Amino acid sequence: MEKKPVPRISILGFVLLFTCSNLFIEEINAQNWLNGHATFYGVNQDPSTFGGACGYDNPYHAGFGVHTTALSSALFRNGQACGACYRVRCNRQLDRRWCLPHGAVTVTATNFCPPNNHGGWCDAPRQHFDMSMPAFLRIARQGNEGVVPVLYTRVTCRRKGGVRFTLKGQANFNMVMISNVGGSGDIKSVSIRGSRTKIWLPMHRNWGVNWQSRNDLRTQTLSFRLTLVDGKTMEFINVVPSSWKFGQTFASRRQFY
């Protein structure tokens, strides 16, 4: 019986089709990634102290762990970016020596990398991440103390438990630190309502994730209405009991997704 030749062209065509399909998928995905650079800071510091310009007393307690980052002014948006999440991966096409293969990490913005206005990495308009060392070592090799090129994209923040409200201030100056926010993570506006005020009162960003109101709401049950930068709004009704004291933190059962 005559043997039929192996259809090598068909196999080659399949391989080419499969390869091209993968390249096409990667190209589509790459459209969502932006170019930037990354460094790390705080080699000898406790990562729990990296609350910085966003005003988080302790990123651990805020629900962020050790994978946090400071942002350059182009990304920080005067504090509005606090709490936002980014997926960052080292760009091996530009730096194969220091970038880890498939190295990627999700970080939360908790601090500000100030510009020096002399061509520094955090000067506008550069898109720069000054990351905690544990986060940086997820994308780059140990021993690199310089700058690595990265690709980054905004991602949904996934938090354990509900949104948290920490009460600060005194008398008729209420300041609330809002943490552990899921979804887009970055807050656009906040309103507060006391059990006796009946109406929603707008709060103003004091700095970072600290929002203020000059209404005396002591001995009242407190509710909050949050709107994130992506437009999602959620109400947290009676999340703080009337017996609250300054310095206390109250966790809700509700969360953005």
Image: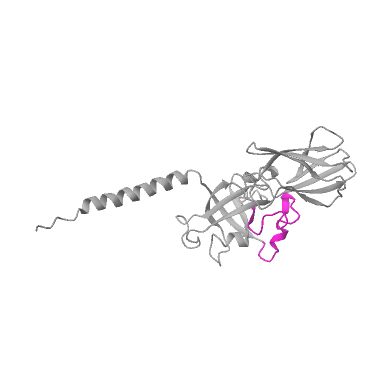
* Residue 147 % position (x, y): 56, 58
Q: Image quadrant of residue 4?
A: bottom left
* Residue found at the far top of this picture: 199
Where's the C terminus, which quadrant? Answer: top right
- Which residues fall within the magenta stretch? 42-70
Left or right relative to 125: residue 198: right
Left or right relative to 125: residue 28: left
Residue at position x 38%, y 49% from top? 22
What secondary structure is the magenta-colored segment mainly?
A: loop
Nearer the observer, 62 or 111: 62
Residue at position x 86%, y 44% from top? 242
* Residue 66 % position (x, y): 65, 59
Residue 112 in view: no
Residue 42 versus residue 16 in the image, above or below: below
* Residue 114 % position (x, y): 68, 50
* Residue 240 % position (x, y): 81, 45
